[in-house]
Amino acid sequence: MTRTLVLGGARSGKSAYAEALAQQSGKEVVYVATAAAGDGEMAQRIALHRTQRPAHWTTVEEKLAMGEILAAWRAPHRLVLVDCLTLWLSNLLFDGGIVYPDVGAIELPPRFHAERAALLTELAQPRGDVVFVSNEVGMGIVPYGAITRAYADEAGRLNQAVAALCDRAVLVAAGLPLVLKGGPC
């Protein structure tokens, strides 16, 4: 059982790299898509990702219950590819139409804490290979606005927690992988 975190910025090549890992595994692949088509541009991105995936992969669309999905689909003969954790984080933060203040402390919804804990608990279990894709959002300037800062903070905390449980972590920049933890992929 191998757990891998693939990090990178926007258009860094992280998804393509993670998909290549899945393809090279020789295992049955379950692709867990976390994106939701909230507008036309996002719908186009989702459509493009669908056309790029092999037709024989199973696709599961899940916006919130990642721990539950991993528990259901991870198995020794299978690799589960989750793309991506930072979209999942956004889904959790804004589930139910929550409106956050522009300034001041942000109180995260109870479901956020429960789902994050469920993901980390499931990831600690040896059930089968998993590859996570996540954006590295903390390498730029401090964002403007309380919820944007809270999002960047939580994305960083989530990436650290997942990386700690993973056997491998890889940063992809300009399509080039840099192994941060574990051996070469």
Image (tube, helix red, strand yellow):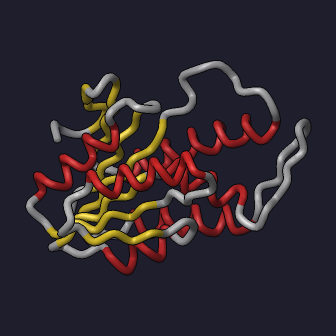
**Quadrant position of the C terminus in the picture:** top left
Query: Which quadrant of the view contains residue 142?
Result: top right
Residue 47: where, in percent of width, then height?
Answer: 40, 55
Q: To which quarter of the image does residue 65 belong? A: bottom right
- Residue 44 horizontal/vertical position (percent): 47, 49
Residues 18 and 168: in front is 18
Residue at (32, 63) in percent of width and height: 31
Residue furthest out toward the bottom:
72
Image quadrant in which the N terminus is located: bottom left
Residue drawn 58% across the image and 61% down it: 116
Counting from the top left corner in percent of width and height, residue 57 is at: 23, 67
- Residue 124, above or below 105: below
Q: Is residue 76 left or right of residue 99?
A: left
Residue drawn at 45 percent across, 30 percent down: 9
Q: Residue at x 56, y 58 (%)?
A: 37
Q: Residue furthest top?
A: 141
Seen from the viewer's position, the closer of residues 30 and 116 is 30
Q: Is residue 104 left or right of residue 165?
A: right
Rendering coords of residue 102 (x, y %): 88, 38
Residue 75 in the figure: left or right of residue 115 = left
Q: Nearer the viewer, residue 99 or 41?
A: 41
